[in-house]
Image: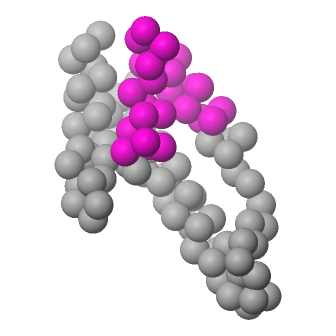
Amino acid sequence: MDKNLFVSTINSIREQMEYDLAYSAVVAEAFKAENASVYDNSLLIKSIIRLLQIHFPPKNNHCEISFYCFECNFGKFGDTDYLSPEQLYDQLTNSN
């Protein structure tokens, strides 16, 4: 998988998750509800990550891609980027 496709895919996942959160917040505000999750894209996102894992398989039951997306909030520490999708790609390709 080339770097541009990988970065584009990671950015699309991030954008979709941000959109989903913003949309849910607007719906919650409109209906005066605490939680208004209108739809769930998690199955699709997990499937996309599984496709990425074909090229970058988990090592020792640890998936760097899932960790980056979900545990590290797409490479952020608070409001600061500390690992870009490009850097993640480089890290993954250098460890193969």
- The quadrant of the picture occupied by the N terminus is top left
Residue at the spot x=63%, y=78% of the render?
25
Q: Is residue 96 above or below residue 10?
A: above
Confirm whether residue 57 shows in the render: no
Q: Residue at x 74, y 54 (%)?
A: 40
User: For the point 57% across and 26% down, which residue is it?
Assistant: 51
Direction front: furthest residue:
34
Main SS of the magenta part reads helix
Q: Which residues are magenta?
A: 46-72
Q: Quadrant of residue 26?
A: bottom right
| Residue at (25, 14) in percent of width and height | 95
- Residue 79 lies, in percent from the top left, at 27, 65
Verify whether residue 69 appears in magenta.
Answer: yes
Q: Picture quarter containing residue 2?
A: top left
Question: How was the colour assigned to the protein in this rendering?
Answer: one colour
Q: In the displayed structure, would residue 63 be above or below residue 34?
A: above
Q: Position of residue 3 (x, y in %)?
A: 32, 33
- Estimate the x, y position of residue 63 in percent, counting from the top left: 45, 23
| Image side of residue 95 versus residue 15, left or right | left
Number of marks in the rendered image = 0
Relative horizontal placement of residue 2, taking residue 63 as reference (left or right):
left
Visible residue check, residue 65: yes
The correct choice, above or below, for 10 with respect to 30 in the image is: above
Q: Which image quarter is the C terminus in?
A: top left
Front residue (pair 38, 33): 33
